[in-house]
Amino acid sequence: MAKLPILEFPDERLRTKAVAVETVDDEVRQLVDDMLETMYDAQGIGLAATQVDVHRRVIVMDVSDDRSTPLVLVNPTYTPIGDEREPMQEGCLSIPEYYAEVPRALKVRLQALGRDGRPYELEAEGLLAHCIQHECDHLEGVLFVDYLSPLKRDRVMKKMQKRHKMGQPA
């Protein structure tokens, strides 16, 4: 396994729309393993392949308290269950040290392929539902700051540009 570099906002590569994975093969499984190592090392709960400059529809996440329940989503799609939405504080490994309230569907139905290439479905709510929506946004080139006002988004961009100028690591 290898730790991968995480792209940081405002890097334009984060805006790339990911392409579907045709076959879950050894290359994809290696990507999944590397992404899990990267996510755990960075103390994150989710990571999309787009964030590590691989523009394929692959996500890893683990919202468990003890970091023992990794979830692999290949070619994920989700559908909100009901109209209920709730705001939740979100952060992002690609936008370190910045958090904001983002309203998202309270419950979702996820369809994806697992690490073994087999399809599965699950219903999620709360933190897992938010994480699924946040990471699926990455595959579309959307960041959580896109849900903020232009003023707040501009403030975050300036903060990140200053961080990069000062050479701070991710």
Image (spheres, rainbow, N blue to C red):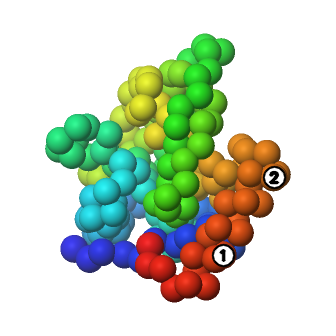
- Which residue bears the numbered disc 1? 161
Q: Residue at x 61, y 15 (%)?
A: 84
Q: Residue at x 48, y 80 (%)?
A: 168
Above or below 11: residue 114: above
Q: Residues within 10 Å of mark 2 (few under 14, many from 20)?
A: few
Q: Depth check: give the residue in front, 119 or 81.
A: 81
Q: Depth check: give the residue in front, 40 or 136.
A: 40
* Percent position of residue 163, x then y: 57, 76
Residue 40 seen from this side? yes
Q: Depth check: give the residue in front, 65 or 114.
A: 65
Does dot 1 land on a helix, a strand or a loop?
helix
Q: Quadrant of residue 156?
A: bottom right
Does dot 2 land on a helix, a strand or a loop?
helix
Residue most extreme to the right: 150
* Percent position of residue 88, x then y: 53, 32
Q: Quadrant of residue 103?
A: top right
* Percent position of residue 66, x then y: 17, 41
Mark 1 and mark 2 in contact? Answer it, CB < 8 Å: no
Q: Amino acid at mark 2?
A: Leu
